[in-house]
Image (spheres, rainbow, N blue to C red):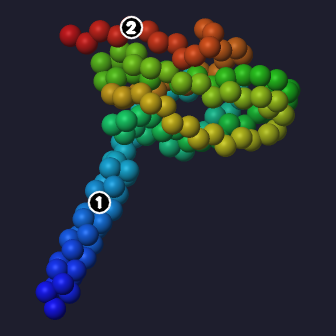
């Protein structure tokens, strides 16, 4: 009989730890998001952003881009330049567009691991600046 009571205690402890871990994981994975200010610096092709949000671990962007130029866009990039509250550069990211047909609409969804985000400037580039990786500029916080 004592073994059953001991087994029951262990079962309850293991169950409580499991429930605690599930709740803690939920709160860690579902961090609050804040909407970011953003500015689109081009008119063609047409870009409509549905979500530009920041968490404490990065920036999340979602939207759609439509090629209304009437021409095939062989290779191009969307550049996302991310700034903090003092309008200092904190990072950037790129989305590559290949073989973008006329009148085609493409959904975009991307996460960028840039912290301390407040605003985003979105550019359309024919070629990606730099070679091999993200461009990083020094930032100084005083």
Q: Does residue 123 appear to the left or right of 4 in the view shown?
A: right
Crowding at mark 1 (Cα within 10 Å: few <14, some 14-19, many 20+):
few
Mark 2 closeness class: few <14, some 14–19, many ≥20 residues within 10 Å: few
List the residue tagged with mark 2.
Answer: 138
Quote the CA–CA distance across marks 2 and 1. Answer: 39 Å
Residue 93 in the image, given as x and y percentages of width and height: 54, 24
The quarter in which the N terminus is drawn is bottom left
Residue 36 appears in view: no
The quarter of the picture where residue 130 lies is top right
Residue at the (63%, 39%) spot, across then down: 108
Residue 88 coordinates in the image, percent (x, y): 35, 15
Identify the image quadrant of the C terminus: top left
Residues 103 and 134: in front is: 134
Of the pair 57 and 39, the residue shown nearer to us:
57
**Mark sitting earlier along the chain (2/1):** 1
Residue 106 is at least partly visible in this image:
yes
Q: Residue furthest bottom?
A: 1
Q: Report the front residue among 45 and 98.
A: 98
- Please give the name of the residue rendered at 32% of the width and 50% of the height, measured from the top-left corner: 28
Disc 1: which residue: 21
2 vs 1, front mark:
1
Q: Is residue 70 above or below residue 109?
A: above
């Amino acid at each position: 009989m004592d073994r059953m009571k001991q087994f029951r205690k262990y079962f309850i402890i293991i169950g409580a730890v499991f429930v605690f871990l599930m709740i803690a994981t939920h709160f860690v994975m579902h961090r609050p998001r804040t909407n970011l200010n953003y500015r689109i610096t081009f008119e063609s092709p047409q870009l409509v952003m549905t979500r530009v949000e920041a968490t404490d671990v990065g920036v999340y962007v979602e939207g759609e881009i439509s090629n209304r130029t009437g021409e095939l866009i062989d290779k191009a990039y969307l550049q996302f330049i991310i700034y903090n509250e003092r309008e200092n550069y904190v990072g950037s990211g790129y989305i590559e567009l290949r073989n973008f047909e006329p009148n085609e609409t493409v959904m975009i969804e991307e996460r960028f691991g840039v912290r301390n985000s407040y605003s985003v400037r979105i550019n359309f580039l024919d070629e990606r600046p730099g070679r091999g990786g993200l461009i990083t500029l020094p930032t100084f916080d005083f």
